[in-house]
Image (spheres, rainbow, N blue to C red):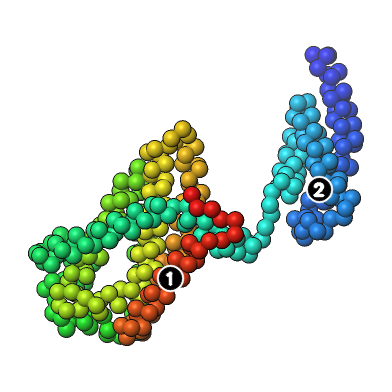
Amino acid sequence: MSARVASSPAVMVNATRFRAAHEAEWSRLDALVTRIEKRSIGALTDDDLLALPLLYRATLSSLSVARDTSLDRGLIAYLEQLSTRAYFQIYGVPTSARRQLATFFRSGWPEAVQSIWRETLVCVALTVAAAIVAYLLVRSDPSWFFGIIPEALSSGRDPTATAGFLRSTLYDRQHDMLAFFATYLFTHNSQIAIFAFALGFAFAVPTVLLIIYNGLMLGAMVAVFAGKGLGANFAAWLMIHGTTEMFAICLAGAAGMRIGTAIAFPGRDTRSDALVRVGRPAAIAMAGTVLMLAIAGLLEGIGRQTVLGDGNRILIGSVMLVGWLAYFYLPRRGSTWR
């Protein structure tokens, strides 16, 4: 008992001496880090820049001693927080939100899309093949349409509709519904894209099925309008927003397929390592599709309802497609396709 009592003053003296010997270093590091956080690294002088890593290492050493000798928790917590702040300022790359956003659009998003170009081609091929199959099925037997597209989704645009009604859905103005329609379409299409991406974790099988079903719906609708002599008109109606929308859904499906195939066939990596390796670019590509779907929603809900000429619709859709292809796939300095 006496030994314990006698040892307590010694520990307190050591802690006091320890704090007194190093507190000046901690305070200076704290002041330098605070200056960088409030302003920038340019606010430091040359002497400060040289002292910053030395002070950081000294603080880490003090933290190690404080933990080993069980000094008071308040001091340990302070040193841990100070060391963490200093680490991010020295080894991190602090950038503004504006710079991060610029980097995303300048290189991050296009490079992520380029990294999944094989999967994107597969999704496009599946969509086109499924659309052709559905078109042929519905043209040969219109009852196939009701097995592909639910009645609530077709909104009367089915094989029983008259040519006049179908034409009205392509050209009638609905100004009072524009904002609501655009919001609905953005939400609906975003859900399809998110499901196509998220379901990729199940070895990409549900993603493939969803992409195929999306193509079947497209082909079935084309067959209905083509059967009434409105195939070219429907194509123009679809192009103004469809080039952006279908491209976005294919990209989302491609990102999901990349993740699913990495899980199913990790190669020499473990499945978790393979997922980490492909997860970041796939997630970046998926994040960008949300913007594409927002643009598609605006084109469909507003542009398509106000631009009624088939030629102008085809022109807008073609320009959007060429623009996306150029943005994603034109060579950039330092970029490499994998």
Residue under the point 19% across and 60% down = 133
Compared to residue 323, the image places residue 252 above or below, namely: above
Q: Quadrant of residue 263?
A: top left
- Judge left or right: residue 8 versus residue 215: right
Q: Quadrant of residue 69?
A: top right
Q: Quadrant of the N terminus?
A: top right
Residue under the point 29% across and 56% down = 126
Residue 140: x, y in percent? 10, 65
Compared to residue 56, the image places residue 155 above or below, namely: below
Q: Which residue is mark 2?
A: 30
Q: Quadrant of residue 83?
A: top right
- Judge left or right: residue 180 versus residue 229: right
Mark number, residue 322:
1
Residue under the point 21% across and 69% down = 221
Q: Amino acid type of disc 2?
A: Asp
Decide if residue 261 is in sight here. Answer: yes
Tag count in the figure?
2
Q: Residues within 10 Å of mark 2 (few under 14, many from 20)?
A: some
Q: Nearer the viewer, mark 2 or mark 1?
A: 1
Q: Secondary structure at mark 2?
A: helix
Q: Residues within 10 Å of mark 1 (few under 14, many from 20)?
A: few
Residue 186: x, y in percent? 38, 68
Residue under the point 36% across and 73% down = 241
Compare residues 83 and 133 and report the one nearer the observer: 133
